Amino acid sequence: MKPGPFTEVSGVCTHPDHRGRGYAAGLMREVVRAILARNEIPFLHVLADNFGAIALYNRLGFVTRWQPMLTALERH
């Protein structure tokens, strides 16, 4: 998504076998650097129970601005 001056960072993930090695942090820093270089504002979303990702995003300077209610529907 790109609403106005904001650019969404989306789809950043690390395979569980390779977590804790700084791969996601390095990728996020580079993506955010590129967004900021275009004078845009990076934003992202994360599920409330994804504590590892939230900790990473907080270390990178992201802060919680809004906590919407999300309902996921699944077809059986």
Image (cartoon, rainbow, N blue to C red):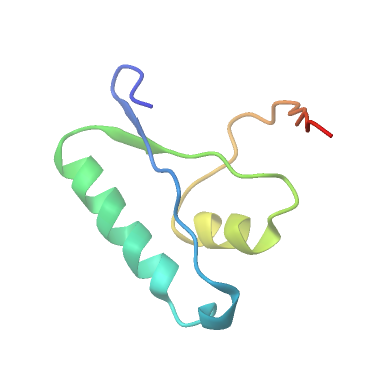
> Which residue, as the protein is rendered here, is positioned at the far front?
76
Quadrant housing residue 71: top right
**Looking at the picture, does residue 21 appear above or below residue 33?**
below
Q: Is residue 37 left or right of residue 60?
A: left
| Residue at point 78%, 33% (across, down) | 74
Q: Quadrant of the C terminus?
A: top right
Q: Position of residue 9 (x, y in %)?
A: 39, 43
**Looking at the picture, does residue 4 appear above or below residue 52?**
above
**Looking at the picture, does residue 14 appear above or below residue 28?**
below
In front: 75, or 44?
75
Q: Position of residue 6 (x, y in %)?
A: 34, 27
| Residue at point 15%, 43% (across, down) | 37
Q: Is residue 30 left or right of residue 26?
A: left
Quadrant housing residue 60: bottom left
Q: Quadrant of the N terminus?
A: top left
Q: How many marks?
A: 0
> Which residue, as the protein is rendered here, is positioned at the far left?
38
Q: Position of residue 61 (x, y in %)?
A: 45, 52
> Which residue, as the protein is rendered here, is positioned at the far top?
4
| Residue at point 31%, 17% (across, down) | 4
Q: Position of residue 57 (x, y in %)?
A: 51, 55
